[in-house]
Image: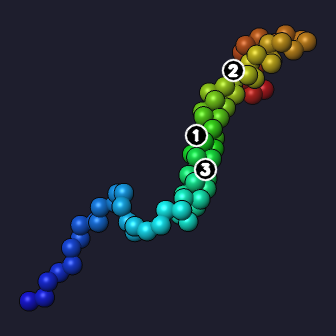
């Protein structure tokens, strides 16, 4: 009977190839900087999305209440 391959995933951790660090150090620094920029951009976009989601209607109400012919709150919230 043939042995079946293992379905367990290989552990991912530190290690890997060992060799000269000088050549790979510049690449790892650039990769770390790129990863930092990507994470920061992702965080900024998620935070902006939440702020716009919860702040849009209050912004419209504040702008509407400060307009010249002062509408009532019901007039601001109804589509007609």
Q: Which color scheme is applied? A: rainbow
Disc 2 marks which residue?
58
User: Looking at the image, which is closer to me, 18 or 53?
Assistant: 18
Disc 1 marks which residue?
43
Determine the residue positioned at 76% across, 16% down: 62
Q: Earlier in the sequence, mark 2 or mark 1?
A: 1
Disc 3 marks which residue?
33
**Nearer the observer, disc 3 or disc 1?**
3
Determine the residue positioned at 58% across, 54% down: 29
**Nearer the observer, disc 3 or disc 2?**
3
Q: Earlier in the sequence, mark 3 or mark 1?
A: 3
User: Looking at the image, which is closer to me, 53 or 33?
Assistant: 33
Image: 52 above or below 12: above
Residue 32 position in % (x across, y down): 56, 52
- Side of 4 where 18 appears, left or right: right
Alpha carbon of mark 2 to alpha carbon of mark 1: how far? 23 Å
Instruction: Tell me the SS state at disc 2.
Output: helix
């Amino acid at each position: 009977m043939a042995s079946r391959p293992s379905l367990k995933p290989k552990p991912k951790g530190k290690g890997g190839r060992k060799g000269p660090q000088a050549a790979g150090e510049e690449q790892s620094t650039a990769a770390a900087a790129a990863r930092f920029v990507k994470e920061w951009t992702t965080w900024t976009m998620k935070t902006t999305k939440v702020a716009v989601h919860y702040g849009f209607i209050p912004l419209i109400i504040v702008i509407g209440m400060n307009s010249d012919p002062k509408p009532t709150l019901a007039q601001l919230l109804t589509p007609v």
